[in-house]
Image (cartoon, helix red, strand yellow):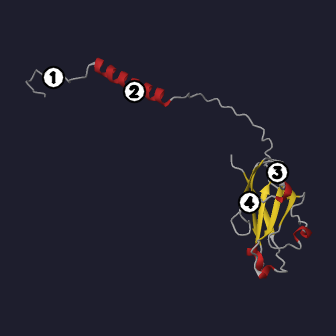
Amino acid sequence: MLTSDHNSVTVPSHRRFNRAPVRSMLTIAAAAAGATLIAVAAAGGTYGLWADSAAVSAGVVTSGSLNLTINNLAAAPINATAWGSMFPGDRVQQTVTVKNTGTTPADVTVVGTSSAAAESDYTIDVSKGACPAAAADLAGPSVLQSAAKALGTWTAAESSAVCIEVTLSPAASNVSNGATVPFTLTMTATQKTV
């Protein structure tokens, strides 16, 4: 404020401001720098700009295979003359060779089908291994009247004899007299899970 006294001039006085001490400002700056350092350290990694890559040769992937043959064929007829002229109580067996020609182990099953009216008078059993001497009964359930029968796990390239047994029931009905009973056996190989 200026007042005029003819010869005197009054100069305004300076107000004093309350400034934060330098030490407080340094403390805040140090805390901010420390927090930044901790955040960078927690993030991990480096912040270099170098990068590199290397090619990996694709190589070759080969899948395994699964294939089943009967007497070295994909579908093999069985000698039907062995089943001819059967009488009630007769049991006839034949051996075929089944091979897993694939490169992976397989669970092998067999199921039989027939559309003949006399089917119920016949029992057809299948077993892994050669037919027993003296035509001993395989004593298994008929693959015609039951679900698929397991023949076990076959290793890659395993070949084995399989016995097929046909029995005409001793109590066969008159429907079987002179009847022809065509049947089909289907063997299935399913990849063995490891």
The Cα atoms of the two marked residues, 3 and 1, are separated by 106 Å
The Cα atoms of the two marked residues, 3 and 4, are separated by 30 Å
Which percent across, then down, holds residue 88?
Answer: 80, 73
| Residue 30 visible in image | yes
Of the residues under marks 3 and 2, which one precedes in the sequence? 2
Query: Around disc 4, counting alpha carbons within 10 Å, would you say few (fewer than 14), some (14 to 19), or many (20 or more)?
Result: few
Q: Is residue 193 above or below residue 111?
A: above
In the image, 66: left or right of 84?
left
Disc 3 residue type (three-letter): Gly
Which percent across, then down, holds residue 16?
Answer: 18, 22
In the image, 83: left or right of 58?
right
**Residue indicated by mark 1:** 13
**Residue indicated by mark 2:** 35
Query: Around disc 1, counting alpha carbons within 10 Å, would you say few (fewer than 14), some (14 to 19), or many (20 or more)?
Result: few
Of the residues under marks 2 and 1, which one precedes in the sequence? 1
Q: Secondary structure at mark 1?
A: loop
Q: Nearer the viewer, residue 163 or 171?
A: 171
- Residue drawn at 31 percent across, 22 percent down: 25
**Residue indicated by mark 3:** 102
The Cα atoms of the two marked residues, 2 and 4, are separated by 83 Å
Disc 4 residue type (three-letter): Ala
Proximity of marks 4 and 1: CB atoms separated by less than 8 Å: no
Q: Secondary structure at mark 2?
A: helix
- Residue drawn at 26 percent across, 19 percent down: 21
Which percent across, then down, holds residue 45?
Answer: 54, 29
Disc 2 residue type (three-letter): Ala
